[in-house]
Amino acid sequence: MSKQSIGQRVVVGLSGGVDSAVTAYLLKQQGYDVIGIFMKNWEDDDDSEYCASNIDFVDAAAVADVLGIEIEHVNFAAEYKDRVFAEFLREYSAGRTPNPDILCNAEIKFKAFLDHALRLGAEKIATGHYARVRLNDATQKHELLKGLDPSKDQSYFLHRLNQTQLSKTLFPVGEMHKTEVRRIADEIGLPNAKKKDSTGICFIGERPFRDFLNQYIAKEPGPIKDEKGRTIGQHVGLSFYTLGQRQGLGIGGLKAKGAQKGGGEHAPWFVARKEMEKNTLWVVQGHEHPWLQSLELSAQDLSWAAGVAPAPGTYTAKTRYRQADAPCSLSLGEQDATAHLRFPEPQWAVTPGQSAVLYDDDVCLGGGVITG
């Protein structure tokens, strides 16, 4: 128990899951004055089988009871709809594939939630993310680091956090492996110790993604073409597909002669391009098809943890979550508004709208939205 922590107020985002529950426990053990907040971010069909935040709140409240801390239920649904969901729909309508979790972290969990916590007199906030923050003594800048459990690291989703947000945030479970978190939860008798990890974002939950988008984006069917320009099927609307997608194309039984390397008559089909002007979906056969490989990308809407762009040079990058870090070289466009990444090895299905996130070893430097 450090002198610094004793009595210092920390507001923990309690989601109902085991990671945030153990976060609150660890901070209380360290002597912090811990308050729990449950964030409600979605209301439209909250009573459906797919997105029942009331169940999560019951779990969060049960955790707070066991730990002996207060919990407050806060509704950020209006902010979420304005700042996250509206952008999500705009991007999908334009044929891109955004990552709403990244926007939610930047706009809700570490902005609206942080503001609310500060109003409660908190000096810090904490979440159950698998990441770490440290102060670099040489630069006096706060750095975002990968979580110690490589299979759970969530720094990719947090790469838009700025110096103010990082300086106010604690990630206790980022210093641990998931197995240890589960063990602690079980040991201290947390009611959600064996609760499954949530997958997906609340407003989609476990439901079929296409069914969800159907409620908000109009279908505009058009042709599916192969690399030779032959029409081999019909898509339901370009917004409903993402590059590299293999399932749900409706052309699995078709054969194509003379398929490219890695293909063959029965090789699976993958979405390779979306041509918005002609409402055409282009597909290729074989995971290794050249249309699915990229040696470079550009990204905009850049956000750097240090507040300034890193120097051009050699780093590693992820172009999607759960991807291994890939060596790359960084160069910057005019006024540092565009980042250009070049890779010695081809990257698979680089997707406009997704985020390219840059790393210097374990330090997450930030990144931007892939434009091409």
Image (cartoon, rainbow, N blue to C red):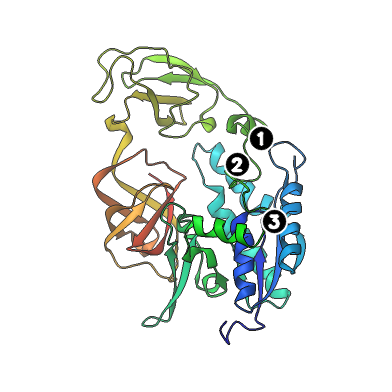
Q: Amino acid at mark 2?
A: Leu
Question: Viewer-proximal residue, 333 or 103?
Answer: 103
Locate residue 101, reporting x and y percent: 56, 51
For the residues labelled 3 and 1, say whether their Cβ atoms are less than 8 Å apart: no
Which is nearer the N-term, disc 2 or disc 3?
A: 3
Q: CA distance from mark 2 to mark 1?
A: 8 Å
Q: For the residues marked 2 and 3, what is the alpha-carbon distance in whole angstroms?
A: 15 Å
Secondary structure category for the residue under label 3: helix
Give the residue number, with chain letter if any, for mark 1. Answer: 216
Q: Earlier in the sequence, mark 3 or mark 1?
A: 3
The foreground one among 24 and 133 is 24
Q: CA distance from mark 3 to mark 1?
A: 18 Å
Q: Which secondary structure, mark 1? A: loop
Q: Amino acid at mark 1?
A: Tyr
Question: Looking at the picture, how far across and down is residue 29, in whole percent?
Answer: 62, 74
Using the rendered image of the protein, determine whether residue 73 is visible from the camera's viewpoint.
yes
In this rendering, the answer to whether 69 lies above or below 291 is below
**Numbered disc 2: secondary structure:** helix
In the rendered image, the residue lying farthest to the front is 187
Q: Identify the mark nearer the N-term, 2 or 1.
A: 2
Question: Mark 2 touching mark 1, by CB under 8 A?
Answer: yes
Q: Which mark is residue 89?
A: 2
Amino acid residing under circle 3:
Glu
Residue shown at 43% from the left, 58% from the top: 149
Residue 191 falls in which quadrant of the image?
A: bottom right
Can you say which quadrant of the picture contains the N terminus?
A: bottom right
The residue tagged 3 is 79
Residue nearest the observer in this picture, 85 or 4: 4
Q: Residue at x 34, y 67 (%)?
A: 310
Q: Would you place residue 190 above or below residue 172 in this image? A: above
Q: Within the image, what quadrant is residue 91 found in?
A: top right
